[in-house]
Image (cartoon, helix red, strand yellow):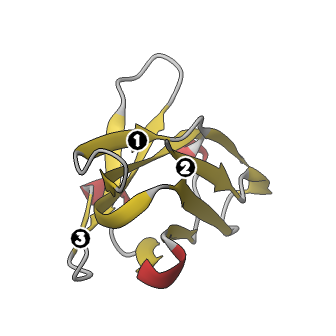
Amino acid sequence: QVQVVESGGGSVQAGGSLNLSCAASGSIVSINDMNWYRLAPGKQRELVASITRTAATTYTDSVKGRFTISRDNAKNTVYLQMNSLKPEDTANYYCKMSALSRRTYSWLEVWGQGILVTVSS
């Protein structure tokens, strides 16, 4: 079994910062892509940021210059530093990882349970 758990969410005022973390645990050989998604009420799920195993990153346009994704391969953890937060960033944020299972030697797409970020104006 492979699990990922997010932490670091909460409520901030516009202009503030939060740092989300997502740690994977279980029977893991390696992890390729690590991703952050978000889902806001009345909106479709959005891919916010991605990072490959070699640290290549991509961002959705609305967060470029404000959010930074990073990873620690030794800890199987991905981070999302969110600065200059806006009310429109309010959403549940989900971590997703592509993990190679040590038990089955198959690739698994593993989602976290989500964590709420609320930005007030």
Front disc: 2 or 3:
2
Residue 86 or 19: which is nearer the viewer? 19
Give the percent coordinates (x, y) of residue 67. Answer: 45, 69
The kind of residue tagged 3 is Thr
Residue 81 or 35: which is nearer the viewer? 35
Q: Earlier in the sequence, mark 1 or mark 3?
A: 3
State the residue at coordinates (29%, 44%).
104
Query: For the residue carrying disc 3, how many other residues have a C-alpha within 10 Å: few (<14), some (14-19), or many (20+)?
Result: some
State the residue at coordinates (32%, 64%).
31
The kind of residue tagged 1 is Val
Front disc: 1 or 3:
1
Residue at the extreme top: 42
**Is 28 rendered above or below residue 118?**
below
**Is 27 rendered above or below residue 32?**
above
Q: Which residue is label 3 attached to?
A: 52
**Is 111 rendered above or below residue 5?**
above
From mark 2 to mark 3, how far is it between C-alphas?
Answer: 17 Å
Q: Which residue is label 2 attached to?
A: 4
Q: Would you say the residues marked 1 and 2 are in contact, meaning their CB atoms lie under 8 Å apart?
A: yes
Give the percent coordinates (x, y) of residue 58. Answer: 22, 66
Residue 102 or 17: which is nearer the viewer? 102
Q: Earlier in the sequence, mark 2 or mark 3?
A: 2
Q: Which residue is label 1 attached to?
A: 110
